[in-house]
Image (spheres, grey):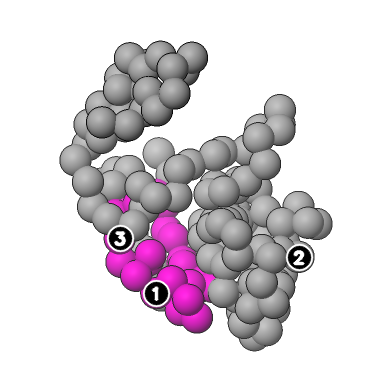
Amino acid sequence: MLTIRIKYIGFDGGNPGFKNSDVVTRFFKEGDMVVENIHDANVLIVGNFIRPNEMQQIMGFTKCIVLYVAEPVLNFQMCYYSGELYKHGHFHYLFGCVDNKPFSRVKFPLYYTSFNHSPDVFDKTNAYVKSCDPTKKNSLRH
């Protein structure tokens, strides 16, 4: 089985805690790791706050690129390069606040990435939402 070697890039300018969270690493198998050198990576996870020198590295990366898009940062000048990658499809996978269109991309609720949570939080949330009556006002409130 292929060992995953992830390099995070484009997070330091506005979301430095992301690369230290378990959003991605919780899915690691034995041998998978985060690396610091881009030449050691086979997966590049790209954040919103890309700097010009990082954009050059991203454009030269020939392996798997995963673009993380947080809301609504693509509207801000500080996220210009991330927006360009998104608009031109320069990525293999996408997660975050993305368009709900019928194509093979991943949508992930961003507010779950801001804290460490129990493994069953998605199941509990889905069960709660399924139990609500959408025809009644405020059915999602406690």
Under mark 2, the amino acid is Glu
Looking at the rendered image, the quarter that the C terminus falls into is top left
Which quarter of the figure has residue 17?
bottom left
Identify which residue is drawn at 46% across, 67% down. Answer: 8
Of 75 and 1, nearer the camera is: 75
Seen in the picture, residue 33 relative to 122 is either above or below; the reply is: below
Q: CA distance from mark 1 to mark 2?
A: 21 Å
Horizontal and vertical percent position of residue 19: 37, 66
Q: Which mark is residue 84?
A: 2
SS at badge 3 = loop
Q: Is residue 54 magenta?
A: no
The residue indicated by pointer 1 is 16
Determine the CA span between mark 3 and mark 2: 26 Å
What's the amino acid at mark 3?
A: Ser
Read off the magenta span. Answer: 3-25
> Which residue is disc 3 drawn over?
21
